[in-house]
Amino acid sequence: MSLIAEAPPKDTYIPSLPPTHTVTLTVNGTEAQLQLSPWTSLLDALREYMDLTGTKKGCDHGQCGACTVLVDGKRINSCLTLAIMQEGKSITTIEGVAQMATDAPDGLHPIQKAFIDCDAFQCGYCTPGQICSAIGLLNEGQAKTTADIRELMSGNICRCGAYTNIVQAIEEVINQQAV
């Protein structure tokens, strides 16, 4: 008698993937139906299924903010939410930010223009998340001081250390809105 267990015949068990579901997402004003596994994150749905690669995958654990998008005008880390949870909501990625400022003469959202004017990026990898987060910050209306901006943007990490210019860009837009 052998002490080594025999492997079951290969044709007796065939693993199968769970079924996918149709998920309808409205991204940058366009509705799309996607066939997604229930565990697909919003970040992966945007990047892998909709080819919207402006939203960056950084840590994939909600710690760096590179994947920040706007959902109904509020900023969220798209790696921490399931795509299926965002059905019926309006999702804005960096690709759709300029559409939010239809009256801008240069076609850019004021935050985008301020980031350019203040040179608020170096490598640029975190910039889409920083811009979406800054727009969310403006929508919240809670930032009154430089310290407020720093605290409210603390969920977005810039490995290059362009924080001074990012804060300056946000302050510039807040000051323009106050006029």
Image: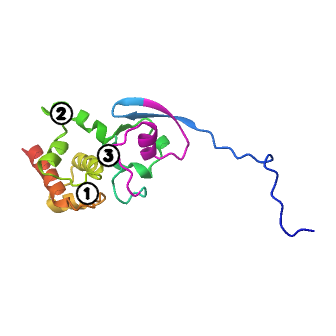
Residue, disc 3: 74
Measured Cα–Cα span from mark 2 to mark 3: 22 Å
Residue at 63% x, 43% y: name it.
Answer: 18
| Lateral position of residue 5 relative to residue 91, left or right | right
Disc on the earlier residue, 2 or 3: 3
Disc on the earlier residue, 2 or 1: 2
Residue flagged by tag 1: what amino acid is it? Met
Q: Secondary structure at mark 3?
A: strand
Quadrant in the picture for the N terminus:
bottom right
Which corner quadrant of the image does residue 99 belong to?
Answer: top left
Q: Does the CB distance between marks 2 and 1 fall below 8 Å?
A: no
Magenta-highlighted residues: 32-59
Residue, disc 1: 153
Q: Is residue 47 magenta?
A: yes
Q: Which mark is residue 107?
A: 2
Disc on the earlier residue, 1 or 3: 3
Up-down relation of residue 179 to residue 64 (above or below): above
Q: Does the CB distance between marks 1 and 3 fall below 8 Å?
A: no
Count every numbered label the image shows and give the total.
Answer: 3
Query: Dot 2, crowdedness within 10 Å: few (<14), some or many (≥20)?
Result: some
Residue at 29% x, 59% y: name it.
Answer: 157
| Lateral position of residue 177 relative to residue 153, left or right | left
Q: Name the image colouring.
A: rainbow
Residue flagged by tag 2: what amino acid is it? Gly
Up-down relation of residue 161 to residue 70 (above or below): below
| Lateral position of residue 4 relative to residue 50, left or right | right
